[in-house]
Each structure stands twice: as C-alpha cells, then as structure tokens.
Amino acid sequence: MKAQLKTAVNRAKYAAVGAAVGAAIGGLVSRQGASTGGAVGGLVGATLSELRSGESAPYTKLKEKLPMSG
C-alpha cells in the first residue's frame, strides 16, 4: 500500500511539473497556448513517470545493467 501511494505521488509530481513547464512555454505564445501547453505537459510528465516507475520499464532495465548501479 505504501509503495502504491508513493508511486501515485511521484506520478502526480511529474505531471504537475510537466504541466507547469508546458503552460509557461505555451504562455509565451498566447493564453490558449498556455492552456494547451499545460495539458500536453501534464500528459508528458505522467508518461515519463510511468516509464521510470515500472519494474519492466526501460529505464529500470538499463539501470540494472550499469556496473555501478547500487
């Protein structure tokens, strides 16, 4: 249960940061661009979180193959 909660919080953090960055970049163009950028940034952040968090994630597999992985 604790691991699931930690995963959900981390996913939310990535989505929030992605949305903020996307909105900031889109805001340079227009108000509608800020809204669209925030939505797209949130999706990208959540997707990156999924890729990094799963046991079968490419990031995890690569990290296991590195000689200095902890």
Image (tube, rainbow, N blue to C red):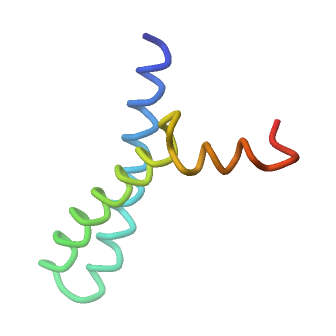
Q: Is residue 54 left or right of residue 70?
A: left
44 or 20, nearer to the observer? 44
Seen in the picture, residue 20 relative to 16 is either above or below; the reply is below
In the image, farthest residue toward the right: 68
In the image, farthest residue toward the top: 1
Tell me the residue at 37%/41% (across/down).
12
Tell me the residue at 26%/79% (across/down).
27
In the image, farthest residue toward the left: 32
Residue 32: percent from left, percent from top: 12, 78
Tell me the residue at 42%/20% (across/down).
4
Residue 29: percent from left, percent from top: 24, 89
Q: Is residue 9 left or right of residue 70?
A: left
Please state the total of marks drawn on the protein image: 0
59 or 22, nearer to the observer? 59
Q: Quarter holding the C terminus?
A: top right
Tell me the residue at 25%/66% (across/down).
40
Image quarter for residue 20?
Answer: bottom left
Seen in the picture, residue 12 relative to 29 is either above or below; the reply is above
Q: Quarter holding the N terminus?
A: top left
Q: Is residue 50 left or right of residue 31?
A: right
Image quarter for residue 11?
Answer: top left
